Image: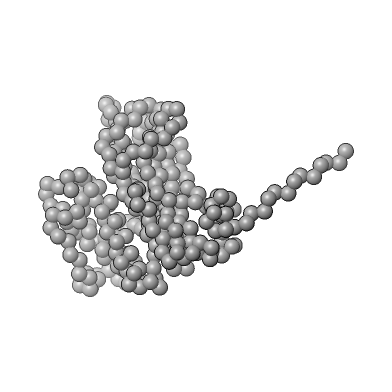
Amino acid sequence: MPAAINSSASQSMAAAVFAVRCFLDPTIPMNDGCLRAIDVRLPVGSLLNATPPHPCGGRFVPIYAAMEAVFQALSEAVPERAIAASGILQPFSIAAVGAPYWIHLSYDFGGVGARRGLDGPDATGVHFGIGRNSVPQAEPVETRCPMIVESVETIPDSGGPGTFRGGLGSRTVLRFLAPCHVTTRGDRLSLAPQGREGGLPGRLGGFYRRHLDGTLERLPSKANNVRFEEGEAFVVETTGGGGLGPPLSRDRALVEADLRAGLITEQGARRDYGLVIPAASPARPGRS
């Protein structure tokens, strides 16, 4: 594609091998035998095998999509080890409008789909590399760039309901202290990650501009140099993972634990899991 979301053949091969090894047995030693056992077909000039002059700056977007495709294909072939669909990472960049020049490059992760017998991890994405450790911490960002990291949090009810719950997505709010340009390279922001075997989809994420009056404007998943003014905020919400199995079959103790931990809301507990929450007892009048 003309946009910078292509991948080279070597990176796409790494994604395919990673996904197969994770699904089958992540303890298998990585050597040439792993490559010989897999037939990876990458047509020259395609999204996953780009050739010059097509750019590959946003290559992690198709790489993660390719890994997700492998996981879902293997889940169909080996349903007893199935994993529901996951939220894909959302890269973005923020750059100065004029001197003094600065740039901030980052991405955030969606929730992982629920697995057989396990809830999906929150806001980590199905990844290779160093995972969430690659997300910059607030202090260095605020030191280098004219912005404030107002909040980083998981989003309650964003994981797909199921017997095993999908991982939560996250919300990060960056408030700007100077005008800047924002470029987005997100994915899986229009079609929600599906659940499996009766599990429900995860909540869709998105990129947003928070105006000075507090209203939110949704940005395209792939946009170039959107100008933000001083005081406006950039909101990154990542997509939650899909659930596995019927939500009403989830262990009540797990639903109650999720509610206490703030992973789901009371409304979500009632709507998705049928949890009956007793009304609060009326306060007794005090003695005189």
Identify the residue at horizontal 12%, vertical 58% (top origin).
44
Identify the residue at horizontal 57%, vertical 58% (top origin).
274
Identify the residue at horizontal 39%, vertical 42% (top origin).
236
Q: Is residue 15 above or below residue 212?
A: below
- Left of 218 or right of it: where is 251? right
* Residue 124 picture location, percent across and down: 40, 54
Q: Nearer the viewer, residue 140 or 152?
A: 152
Give the mark count. Answer: 0
* Residue 51 picture location, percent across and down: 12, 52
* Residue 151 picture location, percent across and down: 46, 40
* Residue 184 picture location, percent across and down: 30, 41
**In the rendered image, which quarter contains the C terminus?**
top right
Instruction: Residue at the far right: name it.
Output: 288
Q: Nearer the viewer, residue 10 or 64?
A: 64
Q: Is residue 104 above or below residue 23?
A: above
Is residue 26 among the parts visible in the rendering?
no
How does the figure colour the protein chain or chains? one colour
- Left of 219 or right of it: where is 158? right
Within the image, what quadrant is residue 251 found in? bottom right
Identify the residue at horizontal 31%, vertical 49% (top origin).
187
Is residue 207 among the parts visible in the rendering?
yes
